[in-house]
Every structure is written in C-alpha cells, then in structure tokens.
Image (tube, helix red, strand yellow):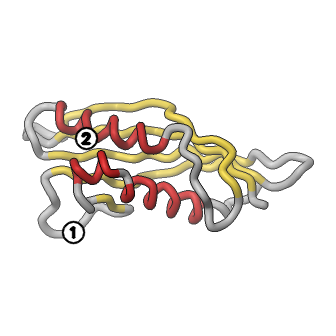
Amino acid sequence: MSYGVAEALQGAVFQRLAADPVLSGMVGTDIYDAIPSGTVPSIYVALGPEVARDRSDQTGAGAEHEFVVSVITDTTGFAQAKAAAAAVSDALVDADLALARGRLVYLNFVKAEAVRIGTGSERRINMTFRARVEDI
C-alpha cells in the first residue's frame, strides 16, 4: 500500500473547492481542513476524516481513499446547507485533479448524511467521496 498520495489528494481537493465559483459564492473563503477556533462563520466547508485502503497491484502502488467533506451552518433549515453541499459534489465528482504526487484514477460520490446538531439551528451535511490514486 502507498499512503504517499494522501497529502497531495487532500491539497488538490482543497484547491478545487476553493477555486469553484459557485461554492465560493456561497461560503466565500470559509473552507477548512480543521474547524476554525473562535467565532465560526455562519456557513463553512470542512475537510474531514479519511480511510485509505491498499489497492496496489502488479503495476505499482495505489490506494483507495474514502474521505468526508462537511457543510456546516447555523442557519435554520437545510436549504442553504444542501445548496452548498450540491456545489461541493458538483466540484468534486469526476474532477480531473492534478496531484503534486501520484495520479488520480477516479473520484466519485458515495453517500451523504444530513443531520441537526443538538437542539439549536445548526445543520451538518457529511458527504463521503471515494478516490482511487496511483503512486507513480
């Protein structure tokens, strides 16, 4: 197995989301790989957990990464969060990402879960994506 492409994959995903004009129109520059400290924006995107599995074969090292991208908002209702989640999905599914290391074979949507957080108005949509990479 090679985990060597993980950082390059995360960086390319972050860059793709940050450069997407539709998503930027909704969340601005509020895209993070860690929840911001202090006062958080009303709506933001966070890169979340990841699970990597070996997909090496006779031709070389590779891995399949399942990673979560979340949209979090304190706005009542799910409409705004779902619109931002759709923009995230549109930006990532089948994206042709250039990685600093390795090569992206595919990037697909796996599932989403929309939940209320606590008893307040906070909403969270966790989207899971699957990427197959080769460490060339």
Pick the front one: 14 or 69: 14
Query: Judging from the image, what secondary structure is the residue with disc 2 in?
Result: strand
- Residue 32, compared with residue 57, is above or below; it is below
Query: Judging from the image, what secondary structure is the residue with disc 1 in?
Result: loop
Rendering coords of residue 30 (x, y %)? 25, 60
Task: Say which amino acid is labelled 1.
Answer: Ser
Rendering coords of residue 101 (x, y %)? 67, 66
Which residue corresponds to the image point at 57% horizontal and 58% vertical from the top-left?
A: 9
Determine which residue is flagged by label 2.
124
Pick the front one: 93 or 32: 93
User: In the rendered view, does 127 fall on the left or right side of 107?
Assistant: left
As drawn, the label of residue 37 is 1
Rendering coords of residue 70 (x, y %)? 34, 46
State which quarter of the image contains the N terminus.
Answer: bottom right
Task: Say which amino acid is labelled 2.
Answer: Arg
C-beta proximity under 8 Å, tags 2 and 1: no
As drawn, the label of residue 132 is none
User: In the rendered view, does 60 fall on the left or right side of 32?
Assistant: right
